Amino acid sequence: MGTATGIIKALNSGVKHLAVKRFTLRYPEQKLKLVGDGYQFDPATGVGIAGYKGRHMLFHDHCTGCNLCSIACEGVAEAIGMVKVPNTWKHNKKAIMPQIDYGKCVFCGLCVDACPFYALYMSNDYELSSFTKEGLIYTPQQLQVKPNVQQDAEIQIDDRGATHG
Amino acid sequence: MTEQIPTDQTKELPPGLQLEKVDDRIMTLNVGPQHPGSGHMRIIVRIDGDYIVDADPDPGYVHRGEEKMAEVRNYLLNIPHLERPVIHDSCNILYPYVLGVEDLVGIEVPERAKYVRVIAAELNRCVYTQYWLAIYGIFLGHSTMFMWPAGDRELMIDLLEKMTGARVTHSYFIPGGVRNDIPANFEDVCLRQVNYFEKRIKEYADIFYDNPILKARTEDTGVLSSQDAIRLGTTGSVLRASGIDYDVRVKEPYDVYEELDVHTNVLKDGDSYARSKIPWLDMLESCNIIRQALEKMPKSGSVRTKLKPNPKGVGNDEVYRRVESGRGAAGMHIISNGKPEPYRVKISPGSFRNLIALPYLLKGEKLGNMPAVYWSLNYWPVEADR
Ligand code: SF4
Ligand code: SF4
């Protein structure tokens, strides 16, 4: 193939893209739809449930303050500290629950795997930026709140290329 | 009138403070470590005019002590940090560790998990190669070739995100299988996106691989003969671009690669062009492997053999396992002494093997060809530094 033909072919392949749809996701107007409600773990079978590994969800009615999540995280990022919570529960006499520092967490989900009482899950919320370091530390009360996420963009493929809907 | 400062010529200077002897012709140039064109590494190049007389790569700028860290964490908690050396290829760099621990503990992996791991590893190889290709394009001044792979990579990242729950650092493989089963409907979405991805990367031929400007830039630069490729101990795409048919997936198949039809791409020229083309051909091959694996995968079943949090029964033993990563053979040597933590984990990554060829390839090249040769080595500085 001659040099001129080669260059024309290369230019042409770029020009063809004028007719191709735009693939770029226009975040934050569009947000990618994630699988399920976040990563969960079933201690009975020992297998996780597929989902996005985002900010954690803590279920106060399940957490016994057993410390296992914090022990797991000690070998990973030391992001979990156990703190006092105001109300005591029958299943949580010590009234301690995990508090997670998202300045350190690497979202590996091994703390979720470690929890034997279905108390710690992960959610689809990934927008955690904060102006202060303290703002990244989530107390058990904050972790209890179910995130309100609106994510609906999905990759769609047709003859004119792929888009995010 | 400037006053001459008397100098004591006889005084011994301590080592490290000695002045370099100045040569009028030869100039020493430090490329990196913060220069984007060198990765996180310094290359000390000595040039005579425009020609490189000597190049000395100086890795270690992003050394993280992964091997030492692995000695104080138990076998499971080693997973998140051991994939940090190559976050874009995190499944493949973790693969030898997981295989090794399985050998040490002696657990069987369910059949379905093996297929899921192969699919994840091949998707990850595409993600890494696309990233590398984007960098290779931009350092050759081809900005379209930066945009396209960076965009199309999203198709594969999306699949991995559905599978593993994370876009880059997946922490997905675990001794005994994988951490979670793939979501419902994943097979259809995967097949659709992989087919489209394949169609897209085939379009790179016109704009990049058959482009006369790229060929003029990379052909016959940095030629590595097949003897030298073996003598220097290179692996992966560098070795296969020099005409040696070697792929760990075929020669020492692990998991279910034995049952899949894996074609090894080999080119004979050994120049930068061949080295940049092999990873692209490998991506097309990865698409084939993913399709085969999706077809043959058992439709249901367990994906993880349960392992106690601190695997007991690890005796005094050692194991070396390796896999074909995006940059060549990646191996891990794990020594255990019966404790919950490994005694030693030695990571042997492909990047470090390939870097050794750089001084030989750059000698006699023009300085302007340095990015074309350096990035064609498929080198990832962080992986080499561990
Ligand atoms: S996800 Fe990983 S790093 Fe984050 S808190 Fe849990 S164990 Fe620690
Ligand atoms: S979240 Fe789970 S592992 Fe952590 S303290 Fe509560 S019950 Fe224990």
Image: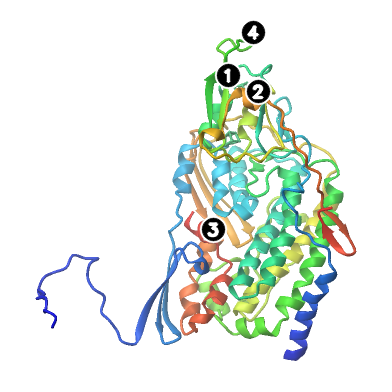
Cβ–Cβ below 8 Å for labels 2 and 4? no
Q: Ligand 2 within 8 A of label 2's CB?
A: yes
Q: Where is residue B78 in the image (x, y as percent from the top left)?
A: 54, 41
Cβ–Cβ below 8 Å for labels 1 and 2? yes
Please state if B141 lies on the left or on the right of A36 as rendered: left
Q: Ligand 2 within 8 A of label 1's CB?
A: yes
Q: Give the CA separation, mark 2 to mark 3.
A: 36 Å
Mark sitting on residue B349: 3
Split into 4 quadrants, where in the image is the N terminus of chain B? bottom left
- Of badges 1 and 4, the one in the foreground is 4
Mark sitting on residue A116: 2
Q: Which of marks 2 and 4 is nearer the N terminus?
A: 4
- Of badges 3 and 4, the one in the foreground is 4
The amino acid type, in three-letter code, at marker 1 is Cys
The residue at which mark 4 appears reads as A90
- Vertical comparison of B358 with A87: above or below: below
Query: Which residue shows up at 81% across the image and 71% down it?
Result: A17
- Who is closer to the viewer here, B345 or B154? B154
- Who is closer to the viewer here, B151 or B82? B151
> Which chain hosts label 1?
A
Q: Give the CA separation, mark 1 to mark 4.
A: 13 Å
The residue at which mark 1 appears reads as A66
The amino acid type, in three-letter code, at marker 2 is Pro
The amino acid type, in three-letter code, at marker 4 is Lys
